[in-house]
Amino acid sequence: QVQIVESGGGSVQSGGSLRLSCVASGITISSACMGWFRQAPGKEREGVAAFDTQSGTTYADSVKGRFTLSQDNAKNTLYLQMNALQPDDTAMYYCAATIFRCGLLMGTERFQFLSNYASWGQGTQVTVSS
């Protein structure tokens, strides 16, 4: 059974940084499709970054150049480094993982794939004030 636990959220001012962590059990992140999503109040959930070791990371256009996804295989942990945070980044952030690979999928197809097949954590809140 796949279990996902996110942490690292908090409140920061505009321009600040946070690093989110996603610890996975029941799945090996080096052979999985994983990603980060977010959902702001009153808005639909959206993909932020999706990763597969076969072909690297896909980022949403809104976070390119500001957010960086990385992984520590020894700790089976996925990270999301978020820099230059803006009030529009305020949301609950969720980590998602599936044993099915997504390396051959491009762009938003990865986010849709994770939405359909992934296990999810409980989320961690990120709040950015202006």
Image: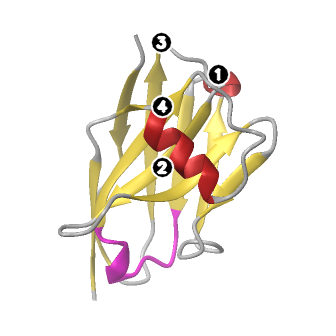
The magenta span reads 82-90
Residue 70 visible in image:
yes
As helix, strand or loop, the secondary structure at mark 4 comes to helix
Say if residue 79 shows up in the picture. no
For image coordinates 81% across by 36% down, the residue present is 54
Residue 71 higher or lower than 40, as above or below = above
For discs 3 and 1, the disc positioned in front in the rendered view: 3
Give whichever of 94, 43 is nearer the camera: 43
Which disc, if any, is residue 117? 4
Separation of residues labelled 4 and 2 (CA atoms)? 14 Å
- The residue that disc 1 covers is 74
> Can you tell which of label 3 and label 4 is closer to the viewer?
4
Query: What is the three-letter code of the residue carrying label 1?
Result: Ala
Q: Earlier in the sequence, mark 3 or mark 1?
A: 3
Q: Earlier in the sequence, mark 4 or mark 1?
A: 1
Q: Which mark is residue 26?
A: 3
Q: Is residue 3 left or right of residue 11?
A: right
Question: Cα distance, mark 3 to mark 2?
Answer: 18 Å
Q: Quadrant of the N terminus?
A: top left
